[in-house]
Image (spheres, rainbow, N blue to C red):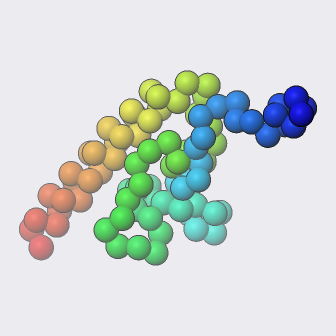
Amino acid sequence: MAQFVRDNAWGHHACGTCAIGPRDRNGVVDSRFKVHGTRGLRVVDASIFPRIPGFFIASAVCIAAEKAAEVILTDANRNEGT
């Protein structure tokens, strides 16, 4: 039982289930946090990291959120003129 837990328990926070990257490399979101093949859906949380970004991922999540806010505001301002 102890070995099973060692082999299967998370050693880090869960992340990577909606990784940024191209579809052909199993990416789920693009560099603008948009989900491939959808319209109006973005993902901004720890799931966007293709690999665990370190032992304590809170700062990496904050940085990604700041970047996503910038991207979303830029896209919104760009669409106001259309």
Identified at 16% across, 66% down, the residue is 79
Q: From the image, which quarter does the C terminus lie in?
A: bottom left
From this view, report whether residue 29 is shown above or below residue 64: below
The residue furthest front is: 1
Question: With 57 as the anchor, is 68 left or right in this view?
Answer: left
Question: With 11 as the anchor, is 71 left or right in this view?
Answer: left
Picture coordinates of residue 7, whole percent (x, y): 84, 37
The residue furthest left is: 81
Picture coordinates of residue 45, whole percent (x, y): 44, 45
Question: With 45 as the anchor, is 41 left or right in this view?
Answer: left
In this rendering, the count of numbered labels is: 0
From this view, report whether residue 67 is shown above or below residue 76: above
Identified at 48% across, 60% down, the residue is 29
Picture coordinates of residue 32, whole percent (x, y): 38, 56
Q: From the image, which quarter does the N terminus lie in?
A: top right
Identified at 60% across, 40% down, the residue is 14
The residue furthest top is: 56
Identified at 82% across, 34% down, the residue is 5
**For residue 65, what is the image quadrant?**
top left
73 or 48, nearer to the observer: 48
